[in-house]
Each structure stands twice: as structure tokens, then as C-alpha cells.
Image (spheres, grey):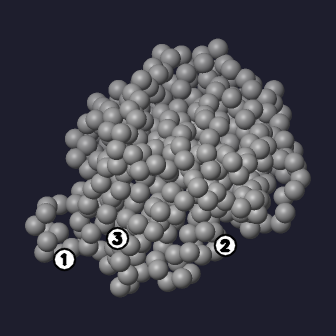
Amino acid sequence: MALAQSPDPAARQPEIEMAPFRLDNGLTLFVLPDHRLPIVSVQVHYHVGSRNELPGITGISHLFEHLMFRGTDELGPEEFARILQAKGGEVNAFTTRDHTSYFENLPAAHLELALRLEAHRLQRLKLDDDNFQTERAVVVSERKLRSVDSPFGLVEEELFATAYTQHPYGWPVIGWDQDLHRLTLEDCLDYYRKYYQPQAMTVVVVGDAAPEKARDLVARHFGDLPSGPALPPLTVKEPPQRGERRAIFKKVSQVEAFYAGYHVVGLNHPDIYPLTLLWVLLSVGKSARFYQEFVRSGRAAEVEVELAPPPWSGQDPDLLAVRGVAAPGASLAALEADVLAHLERLQTDGVEASELARAKKMLKAQLVHSLGRLFYRGLLVALFHMKTGEARRANELLAAYEAVTVDDLVRVAGQYLREDNRTVVILKPVSPEESQALGPLA
């Protein structure tokens, strides 16, 4: 994730005005009025993602996102998007481990059209075998492109599958290949009935819309939906890791690389803020520690920390991962040892106050820049609501980062970046012949 290098955002975090409502059927609505421009962002979030899946049906959340664009008896495939695009709208969707989200950014005059179409496809979705087979084939091809054919996709999957022995974060959002082939239309119908209902929905309207009017429109189009059962809480917890785990992943590759993953926290834990600042300090920008020590010096082609920052952080405890790619002719083992030693030294050598100040400035700049977009404001409120139950925390991000001290960075480094909390996966290049002898990658 790149951070914006925008002007000094010394001012306080711009306040997001929000009006929350709850319909009688359990649907949650947030209206975030902003009348500066005649545009709106309409977002429909379903509080279901790959963490809600079970072994054998992994990938069903993402597959269902595709099915939602297959139309109804009244609207043909992709016609939903074409209607709104003809009105000047942007239409898209995405699936994560914790939620599946659909959105339309469009002129405010067409707010009701977007709400009506969202309600229509929810109630009248055409779930038949033809649509199922078509979209499953698309997702299987997408998995091949994103995971099998990408340089590090399968290695990252191996990291999460090794680090998580019980929790659903151990499988990829797109699902395992054999599960995608095993899924049935009946699986999708069961999933639809269980999760695509008001109790699992958060609707957000951001922009040029009065709260009461937006509430009335949402009630008009979604209010008659029957209330489904309350979502059961996820009871699976990943047990503490009690020793370093290591794996070797062999595939055809032009580079040698390693991943080191550490169990950390999710969005609902205050340590996510010092961990995010540590990620920036180590890895974001050419002044970051890892770039200066390893890349600029020619010892590595790449050393990066991967962490999902708020509000993208996991609802449940997440991983902080480090990826190191050896420079041509350099030793991967030496690079790995030096990078891991650098992380260990954080606990004894600490960080400079100037480094923390730089990281805070970058995160503040990114936040202020992002808050200029209606879409991001709506997303921020929705994700904090769904993952923590406290939408107001969307207005407290900057203060949370500002409160972090150098001692906090040292503390979280010592608490989480431990050898016995670490999983390492080595990408070992092999010849095409050896790869073929090992069997299919998927």
C-alpha cells in the first residue's frame, strides 16, 4: 500500500458527520451528509467474508460477489452496472476476509435509482446453474492469474496456511482451487439465505443527501425485506504459536525470496496503531529503514513489510509479514538473517523520535488526503462499525496515531516480533521439469 506524500496535514482530522439509523428488520444505515458537490457514494456492505466460510466451501464469498452481477429475471447479466454507468456512475464490488462490499459513486440525482437497483438484485437475484457455472469458471481463471501465475501469490498463501492452523484467515479470500471446483449451486443458495439479509447489512449513503430523506429511501426499498437470523459469532480462535514454523515452497521463479509472518492484532486492539507506524517506519518510502539498509545498498532487490492498516486491519488477529527478495547473486540466507536481526534489534536499540515523527506525518497525510473522497469516508465508518461495533472511531484515527510513543514501538516489537511467534516460508526456485514432477501448483 503506497502512502500519499501530500502537504503537511497539521490540522485536526476532518470530522465525519454521521447520522445512524436502524430499520425494524435489523438493517443498519449510516448517512454522511456533504452538500459541497451534487454527488453521492452508495455502499452496501454484507458482514460476511472468507472468515465465515468452512473447509470445503472456501472462496464462496468471492464467488457470490460475482454472482451478484449476473442479473435477475428483469435485468440481464451486467445490466445493473450498465444502467448506473449510463447515469454517470461508477459501479464495483470487492470481497475481503471480513466483509463483501458493493458500491456506486454517482450524481446525487440518481440516489434512489442506485438504492432501488441494489434492493432489486438482492431480492430477485437469478441464481441458476448457468450463472453459477459461468461465474465459477471466471473465478477459477482469476485464481490462476492472481495466485498460481503471480510471482509470490502461492508463497503468501503458504505463509498464511502455515501460520494459521485453525482460524479461517489461513485460507485465501479467493478460495482453494479444489474447493472452487467442489462448490455447488445449492451451497450458494444456502449461503445467500444465511448472509444476504438485513441483519448482516450495513448501508452507507455519503454525499449530497439529507439524512431523513436518505433514511426514507432506504426504508422504502429495503424496509420490507424479512429480517433474517442474527449472525452467529465466529468462535474459532487461533491458539498462540509456541515456536517458529518453517516451510519451503518450490516453484519456477527468477528470484529467491522469503516471507516471515508474525501474529499480531486486529482492528479492535489499540496495538494496531503502533504496529502500523512501525510498518511505515520500516518499509514505506525510500527513506524507510529497510530501503536504506538493504535495497539502496544493493543487498536486496526488495524488502517490504506487509500489514493491513486501519480500517483494513482484520476483524480478528492478523499477520504482519516481511518479504525479502535477494539481489541477483546475493545470498538469501544472509539477507533473511540480517532482516530478522534488524527486527530483533528494535527491542534493544529502539527508534529515533525523528523516525516516529516522519511515520506519523506520512500517515496523517494519507488520512487527510483519503478523507477528501466520499467513498473513503463511507468505507471508514462502515468498517469500524462492522469490525468493532464503534463507528465513531472513524473520527479518532489521527488522534490514535498521534498518541503513539517511541516506547510503544519498542514494546510492540518485543511483544509480537518474536522468534516463537514467527512463521517463515522460503521460495526456492526449481526447474520446470522439477516443478512438473512435484505436481500441479493449484
Label 3 sits on what residue type? Answer: Ala
Q: Of the residues under marks 2 and 1, which one precedes in the sequence?
A: 2
Given residues 159 and 404, the one toward you in this image is 404
Label 1 sits on what residue type? Answer: Ser
Q: Residue at x 87, y 56 (%)?
A: 10
Left or right: 338, with 26 as reference point: left
Q: How many marks?
A: 3
- Per the rendering, the mark at residue 333 is 3
Left or right: 299, with 187 as reference point: right
Given residues 310 and 115, the one toward you in this image is 310
Q: CA distance from mark 1 to mark 3?
A: 20 Å
Indicate the secondary structure of the residue bearing disc 2. Answer: loop
- Per the rendering, the mark at residue 431 is 1
Mark 1 residue crowding within 10 angstroms, few (<14) / some (14–19) / many (20+)? few
Mark 2 residue crowding within 10 angstroms, few (<14) / some (14–19) / many (20+)? some
Label 2 sits on what residue type? Answer: Ser
In x, y percent, where is residue 417? 49, 50
Q: CA distance from mark 3 to mark 2?
A: 25 Å
Q: Of the residues tagged 3 and 2, which is closer to the observer? A: 3
Left or right: 10, with 221 as reference point: right
Q: Residue at x 65, y 31 (%)?
A: 385
Do the residues bearing badges 2 and 1 touch, measured as CB atoms within 8 Å? no
